[in-house]
Image: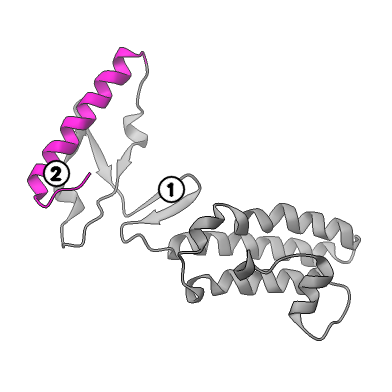
């Protein structure tokens, strides 16, 4: 919802949430008020704590970061928290690949890559196109590191490594 008036927006949000709560009750459903949060997106300097959201006499707390469908969103709609989360997962996966490479074959390493790295890069790929290269550079570096770990051949270029493994680099995905 949006409105230029902070007070009108607050009243509208609470009214709509009242309607949602009534519908949930009518359909014998419930909302866990303790797990319900809101995030205020605004270009103005408003304190989210002064924005009171109430459902069925339960005050809903404001959050600066929310997890939504696997993405970490912040109140500035910045990608940095999500990139940091993915970076952590890819770092762990590179550590696993590094340890496994001494005990297994290339096909198994590719399966591990496709299980532990590729899904994080490929999830909701259409959204990654809106992110600057500088923001996703740490993820590209970690993918490159994983490819170097997997590839048993000492090639001259990273591009050859990707071709040899038949894997697309992150920017080309």
Q: Where is residue 82 shown, x and y percent of the image?
A: 48, 59
- Residue at the spot 75% in from the left edge and 70% down from the top edge: 147
In the picture, measured across the screen, residue 128 lies left or right of residue 47, that is right
Name the residue beneath numbered marker 2.
9
Q: Secondary structure at mark 2?
A: helix
Q: Is residue 55 visible from the viewing direction of this image?
A: no
How many angstroms separate mark 1 from mark 2 (CA)? 23 Å
In the picture, measured across the screen, residue 151 lies left or right of residue 143, that is right
In the picture, measured across the screen, residue 111 lies left or right of residue 63, that is right
Start-end of magenta stretch: 1-28
Whether residues under marks 1 and 2 lie with C-beta atoms below 8 angstroms apart, the answer is no
Q: Where is residue 111 shown, x and y percent of the image?
A: 80, 54
Which corner quadrant of the image does residue 41 belong to? Answer: bottom left
Q: Secondary structure at mark 1?
A: strand
Name the residue beneath numbered marker 1.
67
- Residue at the spot 33% in from the left edge and 34% down from the top edge: 34
Please state, as top left, top right, bottom left or bottom right, where the C terminus lies in the image: bottom right
The residue sitting at the bottom extreme is: 156
Residue 23: say if magenta: yes
- Residue at the spot 32% in from the left edge and 20% down from the top edge: 24
Q: Is residue 166 visible from the viewing direction of this image?
A: yes
Residue 171: say if magenta: no
Secondary structure mainly formed by the magenta segment: helix
Q: Nearer the viewer, mark 1 or mark 2?
A: 2
- Residue at the spot 19% in from the left edge and 47% down from the top edge: 2
């Amino acid at each position: 919802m949006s409105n230029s008036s902070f007070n009108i927006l607050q009243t509208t949000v609470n009214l709509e949430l009242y309607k949602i709560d009534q519908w949930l009750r009518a359909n014998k459903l419930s909302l866990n008020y303790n797990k319900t949060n809101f995030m205020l997106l605004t270009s103005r300097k408003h304190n989210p704590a002064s924005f009171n959201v109430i459902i069925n006499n339960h005050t809903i707390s404001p959050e600066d970061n929310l997890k939504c469908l696997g993405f970490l969103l912040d109140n500035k709609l910045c990608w940095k928290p999500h990139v940091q989360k993915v970076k952590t997962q890819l770092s762990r996966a590179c550590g696993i690949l590094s340890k496994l490479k001494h005990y297994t074959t290339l096909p198994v390493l590719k399966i591990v890559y496709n299980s532990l790295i590729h899904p994080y890069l490929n999830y909701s790929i259409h959204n990654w196109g809106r992110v600057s290269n500088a923001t996703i550079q740490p993820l590209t570096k970690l993918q490159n590191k994983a490819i170097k770990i997997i590839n048993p051949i000492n090639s001259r270029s990273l591009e050859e490594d990707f071709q040899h493994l038949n894997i697309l680099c992150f920017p080309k995905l």
